[in-house]
């Protein structure tokens, strides 16, 4: 594996990414605000005032969440920040603002969304919950959920939170009330499902490493340092057990000194026990994960 593919020292971007995200989001009232203002200018007083207050509230709460890096606020950010893109586009359709203003507001919303999804942001927020001398490496989402379940869950979360209240502000009382009740319920379920994806990580602790992934293991498993023969970038063909949950991209392989029994989840059934002599997992930053293992004296190979 070429070394440049595993480069993990991105300290400049790691430091800049959180502040770039906060700056992009903080600028939205000035970049996208005029588009919203124009779209609401001729609307009824209740819709205009209520929507303006809601936009300010969501913007302020999201900015506050960006200042508190923990796994729960990461889920909130990854639900709310992408919602700014359809919001700006919807406002643009109902606005006479110039093309330049619309392009600027959309570009900032897209930039904030892209930054919110980067690996350094995920790593920063996931480690906000870490304890003592541990470091958490977030895992990539399972490949199958990227096709439809993840976009649908996000749409249910964002749409469920906002569509009903907007109908109420437009004085569509009956329909708005029904959609709000249904929408809030769907949003709660969707946000819970999205948060499960946020709570998947490999944890380096003084004793070794833990895989915390409900998709692949029935419960977190500690692999002690002395039990690990080798940790490296997974070769194309490897006989070890696949714990990547179908995640795309480069995986990391762990070869064990002796087989270990682990519990594997089975949909709709009790977990099954399986003896594994090694496994693959998919951190969002394989190079940094391998370098961390080496620094913690876990046998590793770059």
Image (cartoon, rainbow, N blue to C red):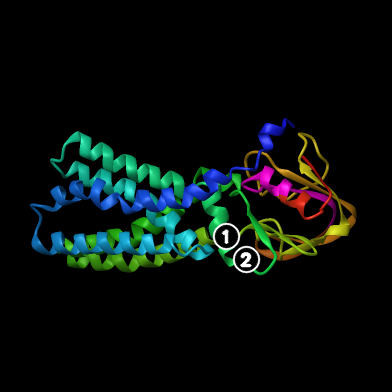
Query: Which residue is nearer to you in this view: 56 or 132?
Result: 132
SS at badge 1: helix
Q: Is residue 145 left or right of residue 241?
A: left
Q: Is residue 89 magenta?
A: no
Please report the residue visible at 79 percent of the width from the left and 35 percent of the height from the top. 237
Residue located farthest toward the right when viewing the structure as drawn: 258
Q: Quadrant of residue 3?
A: top right
Query: Which residue is nearer to you in this view: 181 or 101?
Result: 101
Query: Residue 108: percent from the left, percent from the top?
Result: 33, 43
Q: Where are the magenta residues, as a range?
A: 275-291
Residue located farthest toward the top when viewing the structure as drawn: 2
The residue that mark 2 highlights is 130
Query: Which residue is nearer to you in this view: 297 or 119?
Result: 297
**Can see residue 26?**
yes
Q: Are marks 2 and 1 in contact (CB under 8 Å)?
A: yes
Q: Is residue 61 left or right of residue 144?
A: left
Query: Which residue is nearer to you in this view: 231 or 148?
Result: 231
Q: Quadrant of residue 48?
A: bottom left
The residue that mark 1 highlights is 126
Q: Is residue 284 magenta?
A: yes
SS at badge 2: loop
Q: Disc 2 versus disc 1: distance between alpha carbons?
A: 7 Å
Q: Quadrant of the C terminus?
A: top right
Mark 2 burial class by Cα count in 10 Å: few <14, some 14-19, many 20+: some
Q: Is residue 238 left or right of residue 139?
A: right
């Amino acid at each position: 594996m070429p070394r440049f593919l595993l480069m993990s020292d991105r300290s400049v971007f790691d430091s800049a990414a959180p502040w770039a995200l906060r700056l992009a989001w903080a600028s939205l009232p000035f970049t996208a605000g005029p588009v919203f203002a124009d779209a609401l200018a001729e609307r009824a007083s209740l819709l205009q005032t209520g929507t303006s207050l809601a936009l300010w509230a969501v913007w302020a709460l999201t900015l506050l969440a960006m200042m508190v890096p923990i796994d729960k606020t990461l889920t909130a950010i990854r639900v709310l920040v992408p919602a700014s893109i359809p919001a700006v586009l919807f406002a643009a359709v109902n606005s006479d603002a110039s093309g330049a203003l619309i392009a600027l507001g959309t570009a900032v919303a897209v930039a904030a969304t892209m930054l919110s999804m980067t690996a350094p942001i995920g790593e920063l927020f996931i480690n906000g919950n870490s304890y003592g001398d541990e470091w958490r490496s977030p895992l990539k989402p399972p490949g199958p959920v990227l096709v439809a379940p993840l976009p649908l869950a996000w749409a249910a979360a964002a749409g469920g939170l906002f569509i009903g209240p907007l109908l109420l502000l437009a004085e569509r009382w009956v329909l708005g009330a029904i959609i709000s009740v249904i929408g809030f319920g769907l949003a709660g379920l969707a946000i819970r499902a999205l948060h499960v994806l946020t709570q998947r990580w490999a944890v380096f602790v003084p004793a070794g490493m833990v895989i915390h992934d409900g998709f692949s293991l029935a419960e977190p498993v500690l692999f002690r340092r002395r039990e690990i023969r080798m940790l490296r970038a997974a070769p194309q063909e490897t006989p070890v057990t696949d714990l990547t949950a179908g995640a795309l991209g480069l995986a990391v392989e762990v070869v064990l000194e002796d087989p270990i029994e682990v519990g594997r989840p089975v949909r709709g059934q009790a977990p099954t026990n399986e003896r594994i002599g090694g496994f693959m997992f998919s951190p969002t930053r394989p190079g940094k994960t391998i370098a961390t293992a080496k620094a913690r004296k876990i046998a590793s190979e770059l």
